[in-house]
Amino acid sequence: MAEYKDPENTVLIELHNGTVVIELLPDVAPQHCDRMKELARSGAYDGVLFHRVIDGFMAQTGDVAHGKDASNMTRVGTGGSELPDVPAEFSKLPHCRGSIGAARSANPNSANSQFFINFSDNDFLNGQYTVYGQVTSGMDLVDAIAKGEPPMYPDAMVSVKVAADV
């Protein structure tokens, strides 16, 4: 088993080709980190598709309501969990390569279960979307996620776990 700086705030996303390690930032966005861990621990993220993957921009996933149904990709990306939305926790952290951002509607306080991983430095998102994690290992696997809006053959998160639990 690998050693992690803070296993309680480390998330392991298993993809078909390996594991992406994310260090959560509870000092910056505690409610977003708690939500990700709660959904991971419940198994809600397991099997959820990457439904919006824009080359050079970001890979979005986390629609636990609709995100496991590749046969109806028009609905994927429109839902969240049954839990209440999470209010914005904006910070000075930049949306840099590998950072995790909370996806939301036009309402800044509408984040729920969806998130995105930045492929590049996306400074135009700074101060508009909550940053609450950083990929520390496996960014090459993120780069290999099938592209498209939606992808023709979308990749899925096989499983999502909190490192302290494995």
Image (spheres, rainbow, N blue to C red):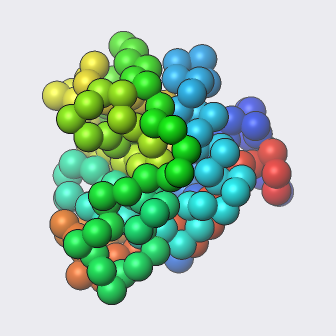
Residue at coordinates 46% horizontally, 74% vertically from top-left? 68
Q: Is residue 22 above or below residue 48?
A: above
Expressed as whole percent of the image width and height from the top left, the position of residue 25 reads: 57, 27
Q: Does residue 101 show up?
A: no
Expressed as whole percent of the image width and height from the top left, the position of residue 155 reads: 40, 74
In this view, the residue in front, 160 or 80, is 80
Residue at coordinates 20% horizontally, 58% vertically from top-left? 54
Residue at coordinates 47% horizontally, 48% vertically from top-left? 113
Expressed as whole percent of the image width and height from the top left, the position of residue 40 reads: 64, 53
Q: Is residue 20 left or right of residue 128?
A: right
In this view, the residue in front, 34 or 101, is 34
Q: Is residue 102 above or below residue 74?
A: above
Residue at coordinates 68% horizontally, 35% vertically from top-left? 9
Q: Does residue 118 show up?
A: yes
Give the total number of marks visible in the rendering.
0
Q: Is residue 9 above or below residue 143?
A: above
**Which quadrant is the N terminus positioned in?**
bottom right
Quadrant in the picture for residue 145: bottom left
Quadrant in the picture for residue 152: bottom left
